[in-house]
Image: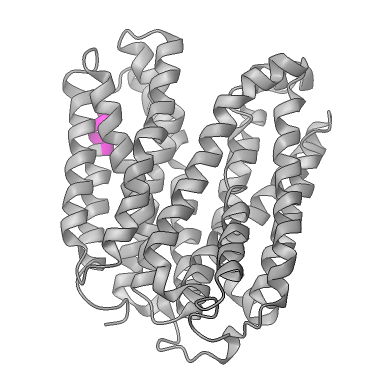
Amino acid sequence: MQSGHFDNRRWAFIGAIFALMLAAANLRGGLVVIGPIVADMRADLGVSASAFGMLMTLPLICFGVISLLVPALARKVEPLRVVLGATLLIALGAALRLLMHFPIMLLGTLLLGTGIAVLNVLIPGLVKGLFPKQSGSLTGLYTVVLTLGATLSIVSAIPMRDYFGSWQAPLVVWALLPLLAALVWLPMLRVQFTPKNMPTPSASVWRLPKAWALTAFMGLQSSVFYVLATWLPRLLMDSGYSDVYAGSLTSLLALVGLPAAFLIPVVAARMQSQRGLILMILVTGLAGMFGLLLLPEKFAEIWVSLLGVYGGSSLSMALVLFAIKTHDMRQATALSAMVQGLGYLGASVTPSLVGASYDISQEWTLVVWGMIAVIAVQNLAGWIVCAPGKIDE
């Protein structure tokens, strides 16, 4: 396929963006929907907390392991067909999680995590390959869609459970949505798209120092996200807030980050060096963490909002760098696979380490200092990647 394939065909252009974003809408919702209904599911299934934790841990392991295999798969099978297969796999995995049998639910989780891992890697590369001129704005839109999918999933879980009288009701939505995405994707299979013929400036991203710096940036921002998603409500409750208000503040984390998640890639794509944006990410992250450290019982809305801006900016910055720091789609896909594979593997162990630290000390000071150090190192790595030039220059 030629660069800018859709530029002179407006409806094909809009249709392709819609298909890509509908696929992206499935990347978090089916995973995080179980958070609000954990108690109901555990009561019906009769499983321990540690066993149930596998429903959240398995997908992160899939993100790490499967991501590394995607470039080889995309070389053997046309990438647009791989997207269709991954979307159907998400639908099948989500459907299996509806069944009242824990081993089958684990199998469903494995399939769901595998499908999501494949799309995690492919979509940034497809944005680069299909829409080279719009890669910044579309990465921003992709990040917003991904975050909104997760937020809507969490917010709607309890109302849907109550309306239908079943914890399975919210899970049904996330089994049907990927089927709709697969249906909408079918016309994309007619696009003549042959990235196999594209020259690749660098044989391997694994030998590039900037690629390792981006891996650190992505992995460390993921660690902070999963720690906050898992433990921020507990930290706020220990600081004197009610459980309901702590939960509301945690959802604020995602919503406040949405404008930044959209704007950062648009601005970054127009800059030779993105180091000014890295400084903004560093300052908002540190300000939010120092607020939680020094005044956790006051102004929590401000500290959480700052961390929301930091989180939305960090994720979208990592994703847009796959597009703007690479020469072509194949290099973008290889970089995405390396960075997300190693990054998610590292991030998957962080919430457990934080939990162990809290169990030992029964207070949050050490944890928050640890997060401050992580944010500092993350943005030092970001500073290296965001120098002018491509990943191999």
Q: Is residue 278 above or below residue 55?
A: below
Q: Give whichever of 213, 82 is nearer the camera.
A: 82
Residue 206: x, y in percent? 41, 75
- Quadrant of the rendered structure where residue 258 is? top left
Left or right: where does residue 360 sit relative to residue 61? left
**Residue lying at 72% horizontally and 32% vertically, measured from the top left:** 171
Numbered range of the magenta stretch: 366-371
- Which residue is at the front of the view, 293 or 168? 168
Which residue is located at x 49 percent, y 83 percent? 3
User: What's the residue at 43%, 59% (across, down)?
Assistant: 139
Residue 344: percent from left, percent from top: 48, 52
Q: Is residue 92 above or below residue 74?
A: above
The total number of labels drawn is: 0
Res 23 → quadrant: bottom right
Look at the image and tell me whether residue 268 can be seen: yes
Residue 69 visible from this viewpoint: no
Image quadrant occupied by the N terminus: bottom right
